[in-house]
């Protein structure tokens, strides 16, 4: 079974300036297994990309990984400004 945390880190690390500050936390709901990605605030824009294309591509890859049971994976970028 593929570790979703490891997959996210492997994809995101080369794209950011501060790979040591990547943090992933989990939240489970009835329908989703949510992976919350926290980055250095300077790296958030790099991960989102122009018009959201970079994060959409990362989400497509993460969503294709099967998780336990009928739940689906969901990737959320936590922005400290919220």
Image (cartoon, rainbow, N blue to C red):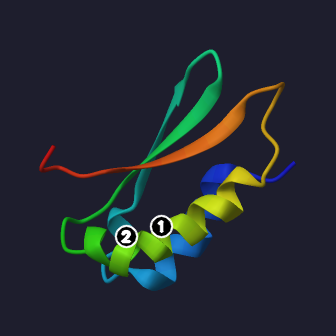
For the C terminus, the quadrant is top left
Of 39 and 71, the residue lying toward us = 71
- Residue situated furthest right in the rendering: 1
Judge from the rendering whether residue 68 lies leftward or rightward of residue 31; answer left or right.
Answer: right
Which element type, helix, strand or loop, lies under badge 1?
helix
- Residue situated furthest front in the rendering: 51
- Residue situated furthest left in the rendering: 81
* Marks 2 and 1 close (CB-CB < 8 Å): yes
Would you name the residue on which mark 2 appears?
48
Identify the mark nearer the N-term, 2 or 1.
2
Judge from the rendering whether residue 40 lies leftward or rightward of residue 46; answer left or right.
Answer: left
Image coordinates of residue 67 in percent, x first then y, are 78, 38
Query: Which residue is drawn at the image coordinates 57% and 19% (left, top)?
Result: 29
Above or below, 29 against 60 in this view is above
Q: Does the rendering let one see residue 49?
A: no
Judge from the rendering whether residue 47 lies leftward or rightward of residue 71; answer left or right.
Answer: left
Image coordinates of residue 79 in percent, x first then y, are 24, 52
Image coordinates of residue 48 in percent, x first then y, are 37, 70
Which of the 4 image quarters holds residue 19? bottom left
Would you name the residue on which mark 1 appears?
55
Query: Which residue is drawn at the image coordinates 32% and 64% (left, top)?
Result: 21
Judge from the rendering whether residue 18 lies leftward or rightward of residue 53; answer left or right.
Answer: left
Which element type, helix, strand or loop, lies under badge 2?
helix
């Amino acid at each position: 079974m593929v570790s979703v945390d490891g997959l996210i880190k492997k994809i995101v690390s080369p794209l950011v300036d501060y790979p040591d500050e990547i943090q992933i936390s989990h939240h489970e709901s009835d329908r989703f297994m949510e992976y919350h990605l926290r980055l250095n605030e300077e790296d958030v824009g790099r991960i989102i990309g122009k018009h959201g294309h970079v994060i959409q591509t990362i989400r497509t890859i993460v969503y294709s990984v099967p998780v336990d049971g009928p739940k689906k994976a969901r990737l959320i970028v936590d922005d400290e400004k919220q």
